[in-house]
Image (cartoon, grey):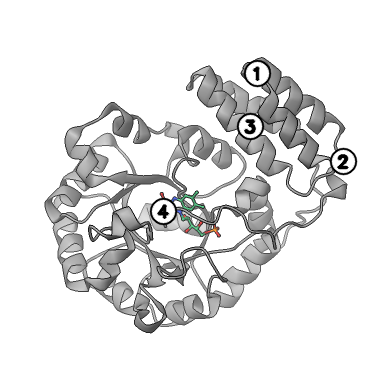
Amino acid sequence: MKEEDLLQALKDNPFLLAPMAGITDRVFRNFMRKQGAGILTSELISANGLLYNSEKTKNLMRFYESERPIGIQIFGEDQEALVNAAQHVEQLGADFVDINLGCPVKKVVKKGAGSAMLREPDKLRRICREIKAKIEIPLTIKIRTGWDQQSRNALDIVQLAYDEGVTWVAIHGRTRSQAYTGQADWDYIAGIKANSPLPIIGNGDVTSAEIAVTRKQESGCDGIMIGRGCLKNPWIFQQSLKRLKGQDFEPLAYDYLPLFEYLRETAEADMDERVQCLLFRKLANWFSAGLPGSGEFRRQIFAARGFAETYDTIRSYYENVHPGLRKDTSHEAFLMGGHG
Ligand SMILES: Cc1cc2nc3c(=O)[nH]c(=O)nc-3n(C[C@H](O)[C@H](O)[C@H](O)COP(=O)(O)O)c2cc1C
């Protein structure tokens, strides 16, 4: 995809799905697109792993045509491996390549990949330059605010990204040291945006359409990336877009059954029964956060055997639950670990 087309897609729908390893596979991404998500990105793919061409990695990189615009995210510490990986992404027909520069996980950073590369801007500059020289599709990066509070250098990274022809920078508003604790620092993100020559995508702790639109308007960011928020509220993207356009976004039917029905059709065609069960249990559990009887429901779905029983349990719960009674659970700790 050409850069101008990708940027137009960002303007059309500035609410992007954040990459989440183990969650945002193609079935999930396609499902969220159907629920209104803008630009999609795959979970992180190891550039070194790609050299071994494993089936698992190849499968992680597949996507549906309906996902476009779709980027594939790569990570690594070795320039040559990253350049190869970016070329591979282009050959697969993805719309853009994203580099993960936010992963805080020890195993990744101790080799110098993920957020550790924020501490090596010269190396990062060379990598971006080499990749840009070898691919035609846009290159984007996803960073944290810095390694730790004393060394927050997002603006330097944005500047080097601009120099090297990167299309945008997505910023998770925490340092590597913070991991997932505290709050994403949106004042810092706004400061970067105000001084950035590049489009900036803000990310972190967006749990409702109100927050998404307020963050966009207050920070001036070109896009808002939403991860965990859509796991409790799958309508968050379409609600955010409507709210941004000043359209009525409430009341929403909160009708869960058609969601599960659509998911079942796409999952059945792509996954074996075991994986499908895992997916449905996870999602049905997350979607029920704050709903009446969700504790008992959770116990039931995890006790259900096989897909048919899992699906029946989901159906009978969501058929009877009253979404209007949902309690806000956004203050509760939720998935406090990940790769970005
Ligand atoms: C389970 C999980 C897995 C994640 N995997 C990735 C990943 O593969 N690549 C990445 O850039 N970020 C990853 N992240 C970070 C998210 O993209 C996002 O930056 C972070 O969750 C903050 O946004 P949120 O508060 O909207 O969830 C992951 C986060 C979680 C919770």
Q: Earlier in the sequence, mark 3 or mark 4?
A: 3
Image location (x, y in percent) of residue 45: 32, 44
| Crowdedness near tag 3: few (<14), some (14–19) or many (≥20) residues, C-alpha within 10 Å | many
Which residue position is annotated with label 1? 305
The label nearer to you, 3 versus 2, is 3
Q: Is mark 3 within 8 Å of ligand 1?
A: no
Above or below residue 203? Residue 236 is: above
Regarding mark 1 in the picture, which secondary structure is present there? loop
| Crowdedness near tag 2: few (<14), some (14–19) or many (≥20) residues, C-alpha within 10 Å | few
The label nearer to you, 3 versus 1, is 1
User: Closest to the observer: 259 or 331?
Assistant: 331
Asked whether disc 3 touches disc 2, contact meaning CB atoms under 8 Å apart, the reply is no
Amino acid on which disc 2 is placed: His
Q: CA distance from mark 2 to mark 1?
A: 26 Å
Which residue position is annotated with label 4? 339
Image location (x, y in percent) of residue 246: 71, 63
Asked whether disc 2 touches disc 1, contact meaning CB atoms under 8 Å apart, the reply is no
Q: CA distance from mark 3 to mark 4?
A: 22 Å
Image location (x, y in percent) of residue 100: 33, 56
Q: Is mark 4 within 8 Å of ligand 1?
A: yes
Question: Is residue 266 something that shows in the picture?
Answer: no
